Image: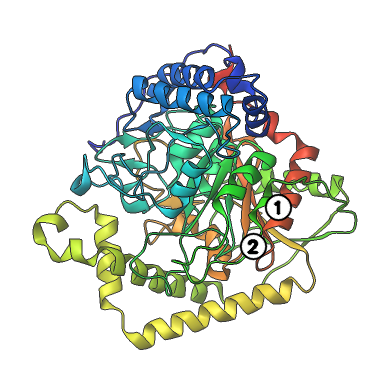
Amino acid sequence: MPSEITPHPPTHPQPVLPAPLALDAVALSQAIHRRELSCVELMQATLGHIERLNPQVNAIVAALEPEGLLAQARERDEQLGRGQSLGVLHGFPQAPKDIAPAAGLITTRGSPLFKGQRTRTDAQVFARMRDAGAVFIGRTNSPEFGLGGHTYNSVYGATGGAFDPTRSAGGSSGGAAAAVALHLLPVADGSDMMGSLRTPAAFNHVFGFRPSFGCVPQGPADEVFFQQFGVSGPMARNVPDLGLLLSVQAGFDARQPLTRQQDASVYAGPLGRDFKGTRIGWLGDLGGHLATEPGVLPLCEQALRHFEAVGCTVEPVLPQADFERVWQAWLDLRSFTVAGNYALLYDDPLRRAQLKPEAVWEIERGLALTGPQLFRASAVRSAWYQALRALFERFDYLVLPSAQVFPFELAQHWPAQVGGRAMDTYHRWMEVVIAATMGGLPALSVPAGLGGPQGRSPVGLQIIGPAQADWAVLQMGHAYDQAGGFSKVRSPLLVG
């Protein structure tokens, strides 16, 4: 067994939720602003709940001292007493993902190279959350440099799933997803390049939204024009809560010239809409191209009935594209990005020795690429976008699984085989998520049910919308959840 992954002890029944933590984020914000609940009470309940449950999953790391956090909570109460609200997250305990800098907090990016490093500045999305009143209590765990769909690293260890801590929470926003599912946090931020908001959401039975490119600033960054894969976004237990956090995160930032001018407050608005006659294209496993673990597709197909329940029609469809060619283009563009970000670490033999093998592989691939190869890969990406755009002339949304597998054992780095087929890279088992990433399209992962060998492993569906249709995707996800009742399902760890 790899030394950096230690299975957590068997789970035991836990007390029911403290009253403040049973509230959805929207209701929580309202209760705080009506002075029905103090920020101190919320912080006390949160810290106690984390103390009870976090050791089982290892979702929140680098936690700050309670005394300082309670002092910040008292300050938030005093501000409200003066009639001053910082925003919709006023008094919310938050733990920004340990992949980008947060002022005054330890930022390791999951790497031993940065163990104990305390940063002085906030990533742009973290600054917006702080400005809206959030109190940062620590970090959520992430794999090294966010690489891979399983949250483990040699600094903090592995993060277990909220429904079965002996299995993966997904990645790279695995700590955020487990924390949200277990009510350790009301909502959480995450980031997504190759499903890092969507895979963990699926593995923890919550909602994770990859916004369309340009909706939310992704920085600070040394390069702000070519980097178009990684995005920041929200994670929550229901779609209105997701919209609440997105209303804080979204909007133009002059430091990121490709971000969009928009009224971000719309995302916190009412989500109700009539979906009668809405057309949904079901992509499934792309005509057998994607390897899937037995049981995943039937659960996803069963969940499609909830779209029909709100008036949608669902029809199987396939994009007109060479899927293998799209995958190879993805490999080149991803490796180009990873090498650009981390080649300096690779160039130093001492630091290179501390990089995980998957990071070394990505960097070496990226360094070997030529300019013409990158141009061809970008052209393939452009053709893929056009193929999806053609589908959106017939369909309002496209749907496919969020993950090709059920959550796997915590000690496993990544699935080497799926459905009897060998995986030729450390992330081939996640190929299902690149459709939206390569297209720059908004994609919402919604729960689809529980299955697997013991019937308690979550699976999810991706709802993909046309370019910049972020609000419409949230509306569809909300209607789906209203029909299926998925946001009412709780982890067995929360059952008293």
The residue labelled by disc 1 is 266
Q: Can residue 163 be seen in this view?
A: no
Alpha carbon distance from label 2 to label 1: 9 Å
Toward the bottom, the furthest residue is 372
Percent of width and height locating residue 410:
38, 35
Name the residue beneath numbered marker 2.
Answer: 262
Spot occupied by residue 96 in the image (x, y as percentages of width and height): 42, 41
Task: Locate the N terminus by quadrant.
Answer: top left
Q: Which of 326 and 21 is in front in this view?
A: 21
* Picture quarter with the C terminus: top right
Residue 377: image quadrant is bottom left
Q: Which residue is drawn at 39% across and 81% down?
A: 374
Residue 391 location (% of width, % of height): 73, 72
User: What amino acid type is highlighted by mark number 2?
Assistant: Gln
In screen coordinates, is 310 left or right of 111?
A: right
Q: Which residue is drawn at 54% across and 58% down?
A: 216
Q: Which of 9 and 288 is in front in this view?
A: 9
Q: In this view, does 165 lie above or below 413?
A: above
Q: Which residue, as the protein is rendered here, is positioned at the far front? A: 82
Picture quadrant of residue 60: top left
Label 2 residue SS: loop
User: Are the residues tagged 2 and 1 within 8 Å (C-beta)?
Assistant: yes
Disc number for residue 414: none
Q: Is residue 247 left or right of residue 217?
A: right
Q: Nearer the viewer, residue 457 or 72?
A: 72
Residue 249 in picture, x, y percent from top left: 54, 51
- Amino acid type of the residue that numbered disc 1 sits on in the rendered structure: Val
